[in-house]
């Protein structure tokens, strides 16, 4: 039992580190690497297996489906959709909480981003929304 708890802790720390790396990639390059999102999904499934909680597959697939439609309509980026779906695997039964958290942190990010654009007298139309998704995921991780 103690080794399972230790492994869950290791997976959680690795996931938090990976989320930070993903946020940095999105902020600095406006790109979320597929390999990092895939690794995050793998860590989520591993966490679920170690803790005895099934990953939130239905919510993740719903997010992926709806997000793919939004991507096709050029409303959001594909990396953001994949990140949100992979992150939702960590929180079975809390998909709505994650989506609301991402929306709230995305609004805050948009305000900060707009203020930075005004200060620099230029605007970049690409909001690094992966940063907001990571912020929501971190709040969920530390709240649970």
Image (cartoon, rainbow, N blue to C red):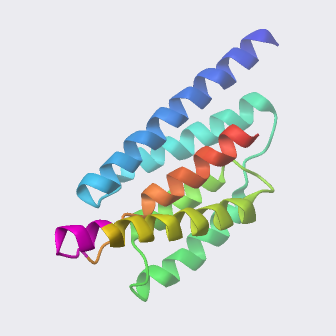
Question: Is residue 89 shown left or right of residue 114?
Answer: right
Residue at the image position 59 percent from the left and 69 percent from the top: 103
> Residue 20: image x %, image y %?
43, 41
Tell me if residue 60 can be seen. Answer: yes
> Residue 34: image x %, image y %?
37, 53
> Residue 107: image x %, image y %?
52, 71
Image quadrant occupied by the N terminus = top right
The residue most toward the bottom is: 73
Along the viewing direction, whichever of 54 and 2 lies nearer the viewer: 2
Residue at the image position 74 percent from the left and 18 percent from the top: 4
* Highlighted magenta segment, given as a residue range: 116-124
Residue at the image position 44 percent from the left and 56 percent from the top: 131
Along the viewing direction, whichever of 127 and 9 lies nearer the viewer: 127
Name which quarter of the figure residue 9 lies in. top right
Question: Is residue 31 shown left or right of residue 42?
Answer: left
The residue most toward the left is: 121
């Amino acid at each position: 039992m103690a080794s399972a708890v230790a492994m869950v802790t290791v997976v959680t720390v690795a996931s938090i580190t990976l989320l930070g790396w993903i946020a940095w990639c999105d902020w600095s390059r406006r790109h979320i690497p597929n390999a990092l999102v895939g690794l995050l999904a793998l860590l989520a499934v591993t966490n679920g297996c170690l803790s005895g909680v099934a990953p939130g597959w239905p919510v993740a697939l719903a997010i992926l489906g709806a997000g793919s439609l939004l991507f096709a309509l050029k409303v959001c980026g594909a990396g953001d959709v994949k990140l949100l779906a992979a992150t939702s695997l960590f929180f079975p039964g809390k998909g709505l909480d994650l989506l609301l958290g991402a929306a709230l942190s995305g609004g805050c990010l948009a305000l900060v981003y707009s203020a930075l654009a005004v200060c620099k007298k230029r605007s970049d139309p690409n909001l690094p929304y992966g940063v907001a998704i990571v912020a929501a995921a971190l709040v969920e991780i530390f709240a649970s």
